[in-house]
C-alpha cells in the first residue's frame, strides 16, 4: 500500500465531508481505555461479520480467537482498517470525503464512455492526539511517527497487541494466547454493538465504505503466518 500521505485520494484537498444519517446504532467513535477498539471487537466475532461483508475471497485463513472458525486475512484486515477510519472520523480525529477521479482501469478496458470516473476517499487530520489501541497506531502512522500497517499480518498484529495490552490475551513465546473467559464476556456485551454498527454503516454509508474498503483490500498484501 502506498504511504499514508497519499494512499487515499488524489491530493490533500478533501471532498465534501460525509456524515452518517441521524438514525443509527450507537456511534462507534468512543475510544475507551478498558474496552477494545471496534477493530478488535469485530476480530472477536469475525465469523459473524464475514456473512455481512464483501470481498472475503482473498488471503490466507486466520483463526478467530476461542472459536472454531477462520476468516480470510486480507478481507478482514481491510474491514479492520475501514472500521478504524470510520471510528476516527466519528471521534473527531479525521474528516473523510469523496471525490471523483479518472477511472484509469475503465479507460483501459474501453468501457461505457459515460462512466470514466470512480469515487476516491480523501481525508483531513483534525485532531493529532492519538487515542488508545489500534486507532492510535493508525493515527500515528498518518502523522509519520509510527509504521504504516501495510500488510494483513501487521493489521492482525496491532489488533492482537491491543488485546494483550488490555489483558484479554498474552503471548506464550511467539504464540498468541487469548483469555477465552474474558473474551466471552466481551462477546456477550459490546461485541454485538460493534457488529450492529458495522452492518449499519455498510448500508447507510455505502458510497464511502465501499471505495474505502476496496482501497484497503487492494493495498494490503497477504503474508504467511498466523
Image: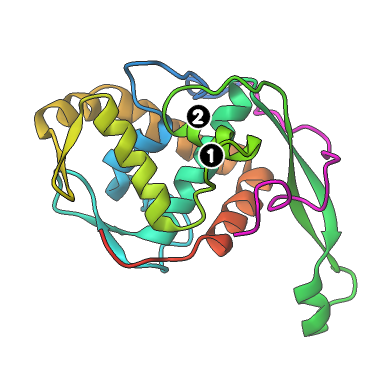
Indicate the position of residue 139 as horizontal and vertical percent values. Answer: 58, 33
Q: Residue at x 51, y 55 (%)?
A: 150
Figure quadrant of the C terminus: bottom left
Residue 104 to residue 163: above or below: below
The residue depicted at 48 percent of the width and 20 percent of the height is 26
Q: Is residue 194 left or right of residue 101?
A: left
Residue 69 location, x and y as percent? Answer: 20, 54
Q: Who's the residue at 57% across and 64% down the image? A: 218
User: Would you place residue 163 above or below residue 114 in this image?
Assistant: above
Q: Earlier in the sequence, mark 2 or mark 1?
A: 2
Considering depth in this image, is 62 or 145 the residue closer to the camera? 145
20 part of magenta stretch: yes
**Stretch of the chain drawn in magenta:** 1-22
What residue would you read off at disc 1?
A: 146
Question: Which element type, helix, strand or loop, lies under badge 1?
Answer: loop
Q: Residues within 10 Å of mark 2 (few under 14, many from 20)?
A: some
Task: Name the front one of labels 2 and 1.
Answer: 1
Q: Main secondary structure of the magenta part?
A: loop
Q: CA distance from mark 2 to mark 1?
A: 10 Å
Q: Is residue 134 left or right of residue 44?
A: right
Q: Which residue is mark 2?
A: 136
The quadrant the N terminus occupies is bottom right
Amino acid at each position: 500500500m502506498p504511504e499514508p500521505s497519499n494512499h487515499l485520494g488524489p491530493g490533500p484537498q478533501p471532498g465534501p465531508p460525509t456524515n452518517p444519517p441521524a438514525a443509527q446504532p450507537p456511534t462507534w467513535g468512543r475510544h475507551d481505555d478498558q474496552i477494545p477498539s471496534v477493530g478488535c471487537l469485530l476480530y472477536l466475532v469475525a465469523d459473524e461479520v464475514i456473512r455481512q461483508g464483501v470481498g472475503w475471497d482473498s488471503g490466507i485463513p486466520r483463526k478467530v480467537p476461542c472459536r472454531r472458525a477462520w476468516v480470510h486475512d486480507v478481507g478482514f484486515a481491510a474491514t479492520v482498517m475501514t472500521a478504524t477510519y470510520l471510528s476516527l472520523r466519528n471521534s473527531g480525529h479525521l474528516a473523510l470525503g469523496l471525490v471523483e477521479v479518472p477511472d484509469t482501469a475503465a479507460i483501459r478496458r474501453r468501457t461505457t464512455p459515460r462512466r470514466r470516473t470512480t469515487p476516491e476517499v480523501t481525508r483531513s487530520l483534525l485532531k493529532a492526539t492519538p487515542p488508545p489501541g489500534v486507532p492510535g497506531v493508525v493515527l500515528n502512522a498518518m502523522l509519520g511517527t509510527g509504521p504504516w500497517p501495510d500488510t494483513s499480518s501487521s493489521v492482525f498484529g496491532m489488533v492482537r497487541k491491543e488485546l494483550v495490552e488490555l489483558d484479554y490475551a498474552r503471548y506464550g513465546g511467539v504464540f498468541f494466547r487469548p483469555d477465552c473467559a474474558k473474551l466471552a464476556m466481551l462477546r456477550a456485551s459490546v461485541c454485538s454493538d460493534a457488529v450492529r454498527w458495522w452492518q449499519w454503516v455498510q448500508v447507510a454509508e455505502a458510497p464511502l465504505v465501499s471505495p474505502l474498503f476496496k482501497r484497503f483490500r487492494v493495498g494490503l498484501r497477504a503474508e504467511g503466518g498466523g
